[in-house]
Amino acid sequence: MNPITMAADKILNGITALLEYMLGIMMIALVGLTFMQVILRYVFNNPTSWSSELSRFILIWLTFTGASVITKYGTHLSMGLNINRFVSGIWSKIIKVVINILIMTTLMIIAYYSWKVTMISGSRIAPMTKIPMYYPWLALPVNAVLMTVYFLADTIKQATKHEERISQ
């Protein structure tokens, strides 16, 4: 592995570690808010008006950030098809790279249009929390870009792998 790839891996691993900590904090916040709302509603009969909206926003970020992290690890749900069973060598590498390029293209389109939607309708204010809708809407373009970066790194690794490693 060359020094540039190693440096990029360190950076991406650092970003992934930060995202994993953020996921933990968001999960704790989501569970805490939900628990608080249940106690306030059913024990004290005095629910809050804002906690379900904030929980929804946290869940949106939790979902898309989680998708970014599992993209890094390559653990998204996928069909159990092993390309190496049908083709080997250079064809396997080409198929994997083409698939990654198609996925990156799709993610860039998603990032572009979700950014446009965020900029158009993000200035609205959430009714209960008074949070600008930019914040929950940014979850999709930000994480689509992160997933694109992870796929780019994987594509570079796939393209620079030696053929004998692919067939293992």
Image (tube, grey):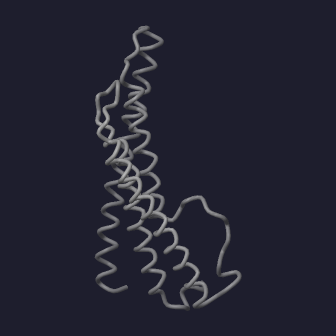
* Residue drawn at point x = 31 percent, y = 70 percent: 10
* Residue drawn at point x = 34 percent, y = 46 percent: 120
The furthest residue to the right = 86
Q: Is residue 41 above or below residue 26?
A: above
User: Based on the displayed image, in which of its 4 quarters is residue 68 positioned?
Assistant: bottom left
Numbered circles on residues, count: 0
The furthest residue to the front = 120
76 or 50: which is nearer to us? 50
Residue 134 on image: x %, y %:
31, 43
Q: Quadrant of the C terminus?
A: bottom right
Q: Quadrant of the N terminus?
A: bottom left
* Residue drawn at point x = 35 percent, y = 55 percent: 142
User: Based on the displayed image, in which of its 4 quarters is residue 78 positioned?
Assistant: bottom right
Residue 86 on image: x %, y %:
71, 82
Residue 44 on image: x %, y %:
41, 8
Q: Is residue 24 above or below residue 114?
A: above
Q: Is residue 28 above or below residue 8?
A: above
Residue 9 on image: x %, y %:
34, 73
> Left of 103 or right of it: where is 53?
left
